[in-house]
Image: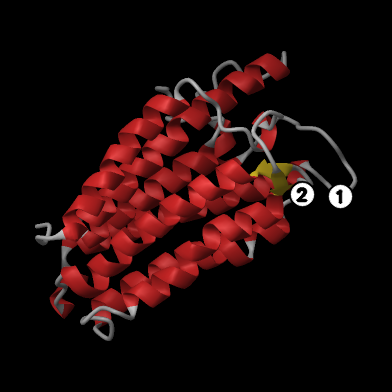
Amino acid sequence: MLPDGPYRWFVFLEVALAVVTFVALCFIVAPYGRHGRTGWGPTVPARVGWVIMESPASILFLVFYLLGAHRFELVPLIFLALWQLHYIQRVFVYPFLMRSSGRMPVAVMAMAMAFNLLNTWINARWISEYGSYATSWLADPRFLIGVVVFLGGMLLNLNSDRILRRLRRPGSGGYSIPYGGGYRLVSSPNYLGEMIEWTGWAIATWSPAGLAFALYTVANLAPRAMANHRWYHETFDDYPASRKALIPYLI
């Protein structure tokens, strides 16, 4: 149950942002990566933008977490470890593995950073302050299923990113059709993996904060996955016709 006071309204704000984001991205493709284009103001190197916009999700999460009354309890510490397992990789490893030398609009970076501040505060405060997790939660089916789903989604995401990186060797340019792994079935298994991952987080924490994040992840990534799918078909005449955009055999 959501606590009284400002916290609940920030959770509602994130859910509302998910709705607005989904509708907006159905009509506007965010201008970075393969969809990069001019007209969005000043830009920064993509690697720099990625580190700046994602770093609050790791660094400030720890700060907000340590403000909680339950910060030294076992289950919250495990949730902290799971969160940091994802974001340390996304902030301090992934950007430095990127092959692209592209640029990112400062506006995109700023919007992502603002969301990460909100989402980080909501989730960190829940697991170390507003949520209540006895040690017995470690044997709860929701925790066990959620952690398995979280780790499975993370592995899919990491493997899919690795396949994309191998397509772009140092000194090579342009894009190619990815094959293998999740790409046998969908055009954006990296996004599918991240959606699965945060669904697992929502199940494991069984929290309104986790649910809000899972909803926003879907709202943000599903339209981009559809845009990527269209881009592949428009760019490559031999793109596999049986491959779906995001959900194997369905969408």
Q: Label 1 crowding class (10 Å Cα cut-off): few <14, some 14-19, many 20+?
A: few
Whichever of callouts 1 and 2 sits on the residue coming sooner in the sequence is 2
Quick check: marks 1 and 2 in contact, CB under 8 Å? yes
Q: Residue furthest right?
A: 171
Residue 137: x percent and y percent? 17, 71
Residue 132 vs residue 218: left or right? left
Kindly indicate the quadrant of the structure image that contains residue 235. Answer: top right
Residue with the mark numbered 2: 99
Q: Residue at x 72, y 13 (%)?
A: 237
Residue 51: x percent and y percent? 62, 60
Kindly indicate the quadrant of the structure image that contains residue 65. Answer: bottom left
State the SS at label 2.
loop
User: Residue 51, relative to residue 228: is it above or below?
Assistant: below
Q: Residue at x 60, y 59 (%)?
A: 52
Q: Which numbered marker is on residue 92?
A: none
Residue with the mark numbered 1: 170
Viewer-closest of 71 and 44: 44
In which quadrant will I find the N terminus?
Answer: bottom left
User: Residue 180, relative to residue 152: is it above or below?
Assistant: above
Q: Residue at x 49, y 46 (%)?
A: 111
